[in-house]
Image: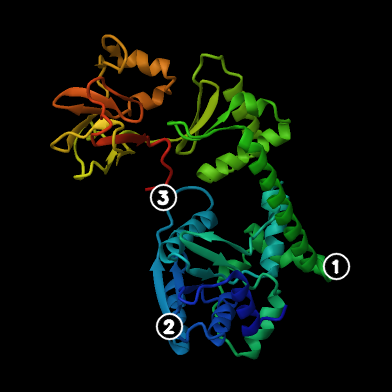
Amino acid sequence: MTPSSAYLNDQLARIGLCAQAQVWIAYSGGMDSHVLLRLAVDSGLNAAGRLRAVHIHHGLDPAADIWAEHCQTICQGLGVELQVHRVVIDGTGSLENRARQARYRVFESLVGEGDLLLQGHHADDQAETLLLRLMRGSGVRGLAAIPAERMLGQGRLLRPLLSCSRIQLQAYAEQQRLCWVDDPSNVDTVHDRNYLRATILPRLVERWPTAVASLNRSADNSADAQRLIQDLAAIDIKSCLNAGAMAGDGLVVAALSRLPDHRRSNVLRYWLHQQAQLLPDEHSLQQLWHQLANARHDAQPLLRLGRWQLRRFDGVIYLLVDAELPAADVEREWQLAADGSGQLSFAGGILQAVATPGEGLLLPRSGCLQVRLRQGGERIRLPGREGSRSLKKLLQQHRMPPWLRSQLPLIYLDDTLVAIAGLWVAEGYQALPEQVGIRLSWRPMSAVREGEF
């Protein structure tokens, strides 16, 4: 596909870009991103000042400052606002991966709701990525290689040049007399991608002239297959979810056991990715399943995946955020609104009150409650039952997972335990039909995912 402003406009029309959306160009100063920047300007995106460029200054090359200055000069000449962001490459592991993670943290912080980030990846990048994934033994998801479009923060990421080859982009750049910078690290064949680019891919093209296009078709076919795999997982998981529980959505071990091995692994992989962007390999999935499903009935196995925990309780597998309770959240005053509504962040979770006439806890005149964590030995008298009951035994009978019991918000009024959020209201403190009541609900930190509330 020959690059042109008309082609770019067609791509933007296809995804339904909002007329008020901000469009960002990831501009490294190299040929690919310069071609994309020029196409975006020629397409009229900057007519209303909605086009911006972002340059990530990694500080990894002595010429990094010069590259940033070059990008600033080019953008000024085109009338495009440029933001230069310096990042710190920290952590361990592949330098390339850490630099990529740093870039995308910046991109996600910039892209607002409905906005779009454009990147200049092309067909040769796609072919190289597919070859790399093949050498790593990747599954279908990996062989889908570089997606043409995906969500990014509150907006979207689009790679409109994936159908264009490097040769086509270079022909356009030379025709337009564009000036770009070359990163010397791109020719260092110690890096796998550069080795493929300089040595392997040219030999493939020499033997099979359409090799790049063929590899791109294979990536597209893998992407289609991955969508089908996800569709199957979305169907299978419906019979396995223990949805709506206080502990959050979990997977029922007995239901998973009824699935064939490959479909069970597919459901587990789908669930872990949906919940926490985790992508364990097949061996890890098998180990995970063996340890969680085959433990003793009364055992409470715990596995860690990075900052996440996998736990089994009462025949259900849960995925929990591996976080500690805030030390300060031992006791809090909770002042409700005049109508009895309110929301409180407590012990890492969310406590909510909804005014419900004639139901729940009777709204106190002061509108003020105390919220505490369990200290041990608490007792409560439940409606219709004689005498008080041990909270510990009630929670065991209710089959509440042990890791939630220490987070459980207890509601007090004048030092009297009057309610257990989301569970019970004490005898004598229920709202009568003609009174204002408050329905209390609680979402513990293990059920509150990032980005919620």
Q: Residue at x 44, y 64 (%)?
A: 113
Q: Are marks 1 and 3 in contact (CB under 8 Å)?
A: no
Residue at label 1? 208
Q: Quadrant of residue 182?
A: bottom right
Q: Identify the element where label 3 is drawn.
A: loop
Closer to the chain start, of discs 1 and 2, is 2
Position of the N terminus, as image quadrant, is bottom right
Where residue 367 appears, as percent x and y from the top left, is 17, 38
Q: Residues within 10 Å of mark 2 (few under 14, many from 20)?
A: few
Say what secondary structure mark 2 lies in: loop
| CA distance for labels 3 and 2 | 30 Å
Residue lying at the far top in this picture: please name it.
386
Q: Are marks 3 and 2 in contact (CB under 8 Å)?
A: no
Q: Is residue 435 visible?
A: yes
Q: Which residue is mark 3?
A: 451
Tag in front: 1 or 2? 2
Q: Eyeballing the image, is 334 above or below 414?
A: below
N-term-proximal mark, 3 vs 2: 2
Camera-side residue: 184 or 104?
104
Number of other residues with Cα within 10 Å of mark 1, as a class: few under 14, some 14 to 19, many 20 or more: few
Q: Is residue 134 above or below residue 244?
A: below
Q: Which residue corresponds to the image point at 56% horizontal and 44% vertical from the top-left?
A: 273
Secondary structure of residue under mark 1: loop
Which mark identifies residue 49? 2
Identify which amino acid the numbered label 1 is placed on: Trp
Q: Is residue 409 or residue 438 the one in the foreground?
A: 438
Q: Amino acid at mark 2?
A: Gly
